Image: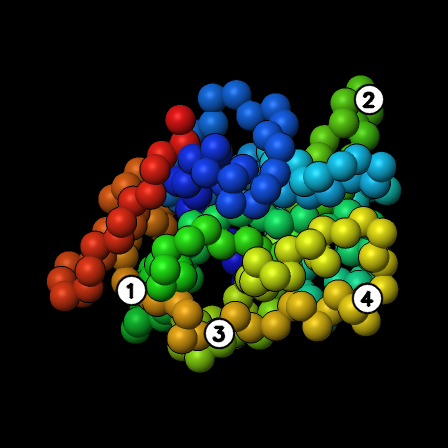
Amino acid sequence: MCGRYTLTTSVRSLADILQAIEVDLPGVQPHFNIPPSAQVLAVRRLPGHEGRQLVPLQWGLIPAWAKDPAIGNRLINARAETAPDKPSFRDAFRRRRCLVLADSFFEWKKQGGKKEPYLLRLRDSRPLAFAGLWERWQSPDERAVETCTILTTEANELVRPLHNRMPAILEPGDYERWLDPGLQDKEKLVPLLHPFPAEKMTAYPVSQLVNDPRHDDAKCLEPSEKDEAAPATETQQLLF
């Protein structure tokens, strides 16, 4: 699964890398420990609109038919194998796909009675694009709430010692197909959702500070004392 991640790359850099237009992004800050229900950044394409939009979405998908928005707390992830046919995600999979943007993500390894957090990122430190789905829910007071979920797939060799699932990370060459709102054939989409090559990623243990989402600073990225030989991460340009 994917339950916590980071995003510190600047909005301008993300817009350039993803060739997207910024939409409603005032005062965005860097985040080193993003938890479910937080506002996150995503890229999407809308039918009838030119180009890609870089937009904020709430993490935890609320289906359009939901009576209680609390369902979003349980829908932060969707299994790639079942999402195309599952009622909570089926319509979004066909019509509302997105890229959820990150620099790295966290996973936990069981060590005795404890869980030790690890940070995972790409070796070249470029931003990650998780395959995601987005939805628009209408609240009783007619307020539109836009939410998202992150698709997961089987873990690769690097992630497997930590967890049996990992976020479905897309290659740049697959972005356009995934975002195309006119493409609704799951047979052409599901093959994009495979484990990312382990040799393109790196992982190292980090501080227990990550266990508490209230800790949201660069210390969350530092190697733990157990791994003094691990290289320090290069913190990318901060958001604003």
Residue ID for mark 3: 197
The answer to whether 7 appears left or right of 49 in the picture is: left
Secondary element at image label 3 = loop
Q: Quadrant of residue 121?
A: bottom left
Q: Nearer the viewer, mark 2 or mark 1?
A: 1
What is the x, y in percent for residue 224?
Answer: 21, 58
Name the spot of residue 145 as percent of width and height, x first: 72, 31
Q: In this rendering, would 154 be left or right of 205? A: right
Q: Residues within 10 Å of mark 4 (few under 14, many from 20)?
A: few
Q: Is residue 99 left or right of residue 8?
A: right
The residue to which callout 2 is attached is 142
Q: CA distance from mark 1 to mark 3?
A: 17 Å
Is disc 1 placed on a helix, strand or loop? strand
Q: List x then y, in percent, for residue 160.
A: 45, 76
- State how far apart marks 3 and 4 are (Cα): 22 Å
Q: Nearer the viewer, mark 1 or mark 3?
A: 3
**Total numbered labels placed on residues in the image:** 4
Amino acid under disc 2: Glu
Q: In the image, which disc is placed on residue 186? A: 4
- The reply to whether discs 4 and 1 touch (Cβ–Cβ < 8 Å) is no
Q: Position of residue 194 (x, y in %)?
A: 61, 72
Q: Earlier in the sequence, mark 3 or mark 4?
A: 4
Residue shown at 49% from the left, 54% from the top: 128
Which numbered disc, 2 or 1, marks the residue that appears first in the sequence? 2
Q: Amino acid at mark 1?
A: Tyr
- Is residue 237 in sight in this rendering? yes
Amino acid type indicated by mark 4: Lys
Is residue 73 visible in this depiction of the protein? no
